[in-house]
């Protein structure tokens, strides 16, 4: 990417806003947990040792200092070589919003930014894949300080557009991965579920840890419409007229059944499935993710 494009003021401003939001989400989550989210995630506590110049001050155990008046740092040891991939749906349906405040894609960007920030903060490499009908953008995993900026600048400049083929994109992802990885998929899953489930099985069979974040707009969950309504399929532009009042209960049952099928099938194959919607606070969404990871 040309440096002059990367350094455009509006791009930098967007990246900074995303970065600050990511930090806010992560810190809010950390403050809300009684025990470290790093336990059982990718590192675990090992022991204390005396602080020496060059150590990160953030690792100082202030409780020990209060008792001994000496500086000790907490040592952590890796229990896995965790490499993360954020796999983000950028198809046209992700551009939907009911309240005109945050689209599904906006929500996915903020969630991905927080996850990337957290992984890089704990020195785990993380990369990015985005897809529509196939994988369209790829950033290899890294722990470099510049990695978060690279991920955020890419996400901030994307516009969701076109059709989607989630199964094809996930199969491409499986073919790309050379080592066991944590694959974090964010999508509205608005497609036939069986090919997607088959692709998830392939990822699990290859030994990858998979988290599927099913993201819908709040209106796609609650259907808060009244009277005669004309609905447009965002990827095909196909129109359908319905009576909202008569359609609502049947629609809600179908959404619930759709999500339950994913929950049941993912449980069978060992994929973590988290249903989310855009009315949920970002910190709650992240808390659900990390709580799941910690096995609480």
Image (cartoon, rainbow, N blue to C red):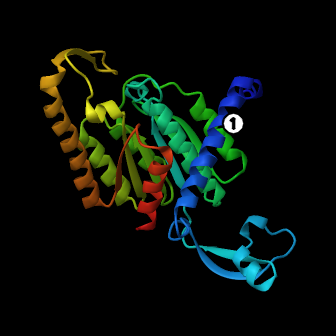
Of the pair 157 and 85, the residue shown nearer to us = 157
Above or below residue 30? Residue 90 is above
The tally of labels here is: 1
Counting from the top left corner in percent of width and height, residue 9 is at 74, 24
**Left or right of 47 in this view: 115:** left
Q: Residue at x 26, y 42 (%)?
A: 195
Q: Residue at x 59, y 27 (%)?
A: 157
- Give the quarter of the figure containing the C terminus: bottom left
Q: Quick check: can you spot residue 131?
A: yes
Element at label 1: helix
Task: Tell which residue pokes out farthest to the bottom in this image.
Answer: 68
- Does 193 sit left or right of 215 as displayed? left
Whole-percent x and y of residue 143?
A: 66, 54
Vertical side of 246 occupied by 166: above or below: below
Tell me: 229 left or right of 104.
Answer: left
* Name of the residue lying farthest toward the right: 53
Residue at the spot x=54%, y=56% of the render? 29
Q: Position of residue 208 (x, y in %)?
A: 42, 59
- Which image quarter holds the N terminus? top right
* Closer to us: 75 or 144: 75
Residue 33 image position (x, y, % from top left):
52, 64
The one nearer the camera, 41 or 22, is 22
Can residue 83 be seen from the camera position used here?
no
Q: Which residue is depicted at the point 26% across and 15% down?
A: 238
Residue that mark 1 sits on: 16
- The residue carrying pointer 1 sits among few (fewer than 14), some (14 to 19) or many (20 or more) residues within 10 Å by Cα, namely some
């Amino acid at each position: 990417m040309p440096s002059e494009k990367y350094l455009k003021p509006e791009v930098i401003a967007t990246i900074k806003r995303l970065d600050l939001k990511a930090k806010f989400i992560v810190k809010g989550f950390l403050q809300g947990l009684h025990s470290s989210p790093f336990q059982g995630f990718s590192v675990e506590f090992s022991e204390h040792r005396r602080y020496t110049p060059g150590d990160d001050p953030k690792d100082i155990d202030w409780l020990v200092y209060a008792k001994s008046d000496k500086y000790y740092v907490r040592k952590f040891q890796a229990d896995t070589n965790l490499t993360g991939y954020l796999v983000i749906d950028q198809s046209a349906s992700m551009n939907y919003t009911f309240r005109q405040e945050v689209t599904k894609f906006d929500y996915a960007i903020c969630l991905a930014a927080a996850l990337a920030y957290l992984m890089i903060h704990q020195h785990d490499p993380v990369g990015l894949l985005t897809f529509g009908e196939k994988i369209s953008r790829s950033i290899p995993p890294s722990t470099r300080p510049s990695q978060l900026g690279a991920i955020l600048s890419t996400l901030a400049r994307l516009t969701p557009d076109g059709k989607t083929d989630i199964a094809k994109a996930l199969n491409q992802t499986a073919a790309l991965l050379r080592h066991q990885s944590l694959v974090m998929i964010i999508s509205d899953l608005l497609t036939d579920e069986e090919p997607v489930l088959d692709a998830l099985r392939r990822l699990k069979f290859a030994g990858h840890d998979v988290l599927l974040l099913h993201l819908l707009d709040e209106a796609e969950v609650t259907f808060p419409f009244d009277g005669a309504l004309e609905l447009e399929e965002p990827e095909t532009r196909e129109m359908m007229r319905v009576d909202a009042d008569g359609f609502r209960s049947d629609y809600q049952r179908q959404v619930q059944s759709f999500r339950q099928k994913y929950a049941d099938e993912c449980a069978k194959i060992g994929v973590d499935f988290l249903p989310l919607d855009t009315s949920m606070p970002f910190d709650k969404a992240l808390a659900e993710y990390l709580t799941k990871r910690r096995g609480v």
